[in-house]
Image (spheres, grey):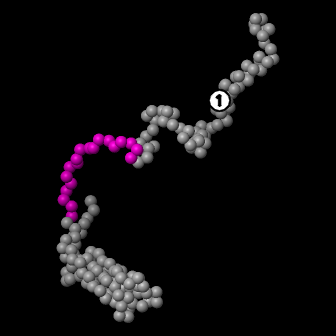
Amino acid sequence: MRRFRPSLTYANVISTICLFLVLGGGAAFAAAHLGKNSVGSEQLKPNAVTSVKVKNGSLKAIDFARDQLPAGAKGDRGPIGPQGATGIVNLLLVEAVGGGNGGVAPLLVSCPGGQHVVSGGVNSQDPKFHVVTNMPAPDGTGWLGKAADKDGTDGKVTVFVLCSAEVKSVTKP
C-alpha cells in the first residue's frame, strides 16, 4: 500500500472514478431507469436494426412481407372428393324492351311455363333515366324493371331474366 500512496493524488482518484462512471455507469443508469421492453419502434431510428443485428432463427414467417420467403415444396395431391350437387340446368335468357309510355307499373318479363328465375336485371340506355325497379317478381316466375327521370317520368328500359327449368337444392355439408 505504501508503494501506491505516493502516486495517489487527487487527480488520479478523480480520473479513476470518472473512468468507472463513464464505462460502467451509463449501462447501470439505463438498467435502473428504463423498464423492460421500454425501447420500441418509436425510439429506433430508420434502418437502425439490420440483418447483422438480428439473431439467426429468431424471426418467424409472420415477421416477413408476403412473397418475401421462398415457398415450400409442393405437397401430394389429395383424394378426389364426392360428386357435388347438380345445381342449375337448362338456362334460358328472356329479354324485353318496354316502358316510356307514361305507365306507372314496371315492365314484367316472365319465364316460360314451369321455369324459375335464377337472376335478372334492368338497363336504361338513356342517361336521363335511372333504374327505379329491379327485382324478381313476387311469385318467382319473372323479373320486374322500371326506369324514371328525376321528375318521375317513365323511361324506356330493357329487362332480362335468366330462367332455369330445373333448380335442384344445394345442401351444404
Residue at the spot x=31%, y=88% of the render?
A: 98
Q: Is residue 68 magenta?
A: yes
Q: Residues within 10 Å of mark 1 (few under 14, many from 20)?
A: few
Residue at the spot x=68%, y=31% of the render?
A: 29
Q: Residue furthest right?
A: 10
Residue at the spot x=29%, y=86% of the render?
A: 97
How many discs mark residues in the rendered view?
Answer: 1
The three-letter amino acid code for the residue at tag 1 is: Ala
- Going by the image, does 88 lie left or right of 71? left
Q: Residue furthest bottom?
A: 102
Residue 100 to residue 143: above or below: below
Quadrant of the drawing holding the N terminus: top right
Quadrant of the drawing holding the C terminus: bottom left
Nearer the observer, 52 or 91:
52
- Going by the image, does 52 lie left or right of 137? right
**Would residue 151 be seen by someone viewing this image from the given angle?**
yes
Q: Main secondary structure of the magenta part?
A: loop
**Would residue 166 be seen by someone viewing this image from the given angle?**
no
**Image-quadrant location for residue 61:** top left
Residue 70 at x, y = what percent? 36, 42
**Image-quadrant location for residue 125:** bottom left
Nearer the observer, 114 or 129:
129
Residue 83 at x, y = what percent? 18, 59
Residue 115 at x, y = what percent? 21, 79
**Magenta residues?**
67-85
Residue at the spot x=22%, y=68% of the render?
A: 87
- Going by the image, does 86 lie left or right of 52? left
Residue 21 to residue 113: above or below: above
Residue under numbered circle 1? 27
Q: Is residue 163 magenta?
A: no
At mark 1, the secondary structure is helix
**Image-quadrant location for residue 122:** bottom left
